[in-house]
Amino acid sequence: MTRAAPLSQILDILNRSPLAQLSLCSKELFHSNFLAWLCNTYGEVGRAAFGGFVASQPCSKIAHVAREKKNIDLWLKFSDGQELIIENKVKSIPTISQLEEYSTKVGNDRTSFLLLSLSRPTFLGSSEVVYVDANHRQWHYLGYGALAERLRGVLQNGTGSPVAGTYHRELIDDYITYIDALNQLHEHFSLENDPDGCFFGPDLMPGDLQESRFYHGIVKMRHAQLAGMLAESLSGMGFETVSDPSTFWAGNSGRVLTTSAMTRATGLVDFKFPLFDKEHTGGPLIL
C-alpha cells in the first residue's frame, strides 16, 4: 500500500485486520507484547528489525527479551553483552522527561536506547532521528511506518523468518499491514500535516472514521500533539513546563502544566499556570 492511499482504503484495511481489532483492547501493551513474542520466537527477525540501533556493529544474536522490567516496555539483551532499551509509544506522545527518567535508572556503557513511537516526537526536527537527553544518552527514533518497512524487508529476505503460508507468517504479515495502515491513518490526521492550521474542521472527521473504533485514538493523538506543541513553544520562551499533574501541584509559581486528556469521547488540552507558590497560599493559585 502506498503512502498516498485514500482514507477509505486505510480504514478498510484496519477494519479487516484481526490483529488491529485485537489491539484495541490495550494498544501499547499489545504492540510491546507482540514485538517481544516476535523477538523471542524469531530472533533473527528481531535482530534485523532492532539490531541496527545498538552501538557496536554487527550486533550478535538476541539472548534475552524482557517485558516491563523496571517499567521498561521492551528490553533486548544480546549475546555479546549489548542491550537495547525500547520505549514504546502508541496512545500517547513521547516526552523528554520520560526518556530521561528511563536513561537515569537503567543502562551502562553497553546500553543503547530506542524510542518506538506512532507519533513523531515534538522535540525532534522534521529530519532528525536522534535525540541526546540530559544524561548524554542517545535516543534513536523509529516510527511505526519505518518498523513496517523493516519487518517487510526481513520477511522478503527470508532469513530466520517463518515459512510463507504458515500460521505465524500470516500473523506477522497481518501485523505489518496493520501498523503500516495505522501509521498512514495517523499521518493523515497529524497536526504536522495540517497546512491550513485547522484543528477540527467538518471535512477532517468524515463519517466513516467517526464510526470506526479508531476515531478516539485520532482525537486523542491530535490533542496530545497540540499539548506537546504548546509545551515546546513555552519552553522556548523560558517557561518550565511539566506534563504530569502531580508534579504541577507542588505549586511552584512559573511552572506551566500542559497536558491532554479525553472525557466523554471529547478531547481536551489542559493548561494551568500558578501565580504564587503553594507555600504562600496553601495551594497553587491558578490562572
Image (cartoon, grey):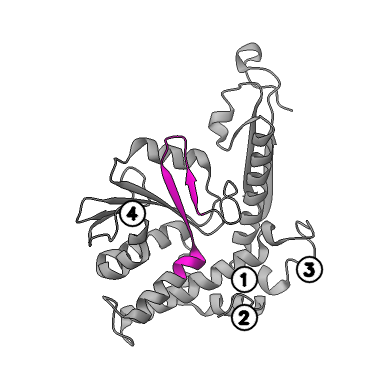
- Foreground disc of the pair 3, 4: 4
Q: Which residue is mark 2?
A: 9
Q: Secondary structure at mark 3?
A: loop
Q: Secondary structure at mark 2?
A: helix
For residue 272, above or below residue 259: above
Q: In terms of sequence position, does the residue under pointer 1 or pointer 3 come before the other?
A: 3
Q: Residues within 10 Å of mark 4 (few under 14, many from 20)?
A: many
Rounded to the nearest angstrom, the CA distance separating label 2 from label 3 is 17 Å
**Farthest residue toward the bottom?**
165
Q: Is residue 154 magenta?
A: no
Residue at 47 percent across and 39 percent down: it is 133
Dot 1 amino acid type: Ser
For residue 147, above or below residue 232: below
Q: Which residues lie in the magenta part?
A: 129-148
Between 230 and 136, the residue placed more toward the observer is 136
Q: Which residue is mark 4?
A: 54
Q: Residues within 10 Å of mark 3 (few under 14, many from 20)?
A: few
Estimate the x, y position of residue 246 in percent, counting from the top left: 54, 31
Horizontal arrangement in the rendering, residue 34 relative to residue 145 (left or right): left
Residue at 28 percent across and 50 percent down: it is 83
Q: Which residue is mark 1?
A: 212
Mark sitting on residue 104: none
Marks 1 & 2, CB-CB < 8 Å contact: no
Dot 4 amino acid type: Val
- Foreground disc of the pair 4, 2: 4
Q: In terms of sequence position, does the residue under pointer 4 or pointer 2 come before the other?
A: 2
Q: In terms of sequence position, does the residue under pointer 3 or pointer 4 come before the other?
A: 4
Q: Which residue is mark 3?
A: 203
Estimate the x, y position of residue 89 in percent, counting from the top left: 48, 54
Estimate the x, y position of residue 56 in percent, counting from the top left: 29, 54
